[in-house]
Image: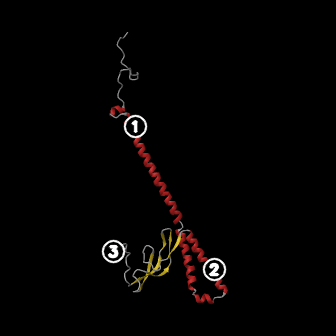
Amino acid sequence: MNDTPNPPSDDAPAKPGMNPAPGPAAASGAAPSTALDRELADTKDRLLRTLAEMENLRKRTEREVTDARVYGISAFARDILTVADSMHRALEALDKEIREKANEGVKGLLDGVELTERALMTALEKHGVKRIEPMGQKFDPNRHQAMFEVEDASVPAGQIMQVVQAGYLIGDRVLRPALVAVSKGGPKAAPANDNPAAS
């Protein structure tokens, strides 16, 4: 019979008063609650970043949907403007004297064409397409395209003297710039004075 006590096995439960082996948290010198706090802070940071990304995505999607609704018909509207131009030129080709001398059938036809042109313009405006009316305004390269210059010393230089072809906006963007004639040779247009008392 062997009286030497058996060494305690690693699987044996620790007896009261015995110090257990240090765990990973104790070995690293960090308390378990500090490690959990750090993990919680990382998780919270990731969650906040994900929420911010989702909010940005939602706003971007809303903006894209709005743009598609407003500007999605741009190509179609440009094609329709060609039809509107043709109708307008046809009506302008007949001066007042020819209209007065025309018989009732021709006058009825002209009235029908004018009515159709007005209906077309109304339909375009309903979908956000508006005509640019630049006559007499200062030339703006963002909205107008200069075709030629007109010598007129009585008009400030850079003012629109004639509209060759109407321009159009869709929403707040230029769908087609207005083709215009610009004054040349007159006095320079006076800049807007923001402080009248200074003059």
Q: Which residue is mark 3?
A: 198
Which of pointers 2 and 3 lies earlier in the amino acid sequence?
2
Residue at 64% over, 85% down: 107
Residue at 61% over, 80% down: 113
Answer few, some or many: residues within 10 Å of disc 2's Cα (few below 14, many 20 plus, some between 14 and 19).
Answer: few
Q: Quadrant of the N terminus?
A: top left
- Residue 55 image point, x, y percent: 47, 53
- Residue 69 image point, x, y percent: 53, 63
**Mark whose residue sits in front, 1 or 3:** 3
Of helix, strand and loop, which one carries label 2? helix
Which of pointers 1 and 2 lies earlier in the amino acid sequence?
1
- Seen from the viewer's position, the closer of residues 113 and 79 is 113
The three-letter amino acid code for the residue at tag 2 is Gly
Q: Which residue is mark 2?
A: 112
Are dots 1 and 3 in contact, CB under 8 Å? no
From what the image shows, is residue 27 above or below residue 199? above
From what the image shows, is residue 106 above or below residue 122? below
Residue at 56% over, 76% down: 84
Answer few, some or many: residues within 10 Å of disc 1's Cα (few below 14, many 20 plus, some between 14 and 19).
Answer: few
Furthest toward the top, the residue is 1
Of helix, strand and loop, which one carries label 1? helix
Disc ID at residue 36:
1
Q: Identify the image quadrant of residue 45.
A: top left
Q: How far separated are the C-alphas under marks 1 and 2?
A: 81 Å
Q: Identify the image quadrant of residue 31.
A: top left
The three-letter amino acid code for the residue at tag 3 is Ala
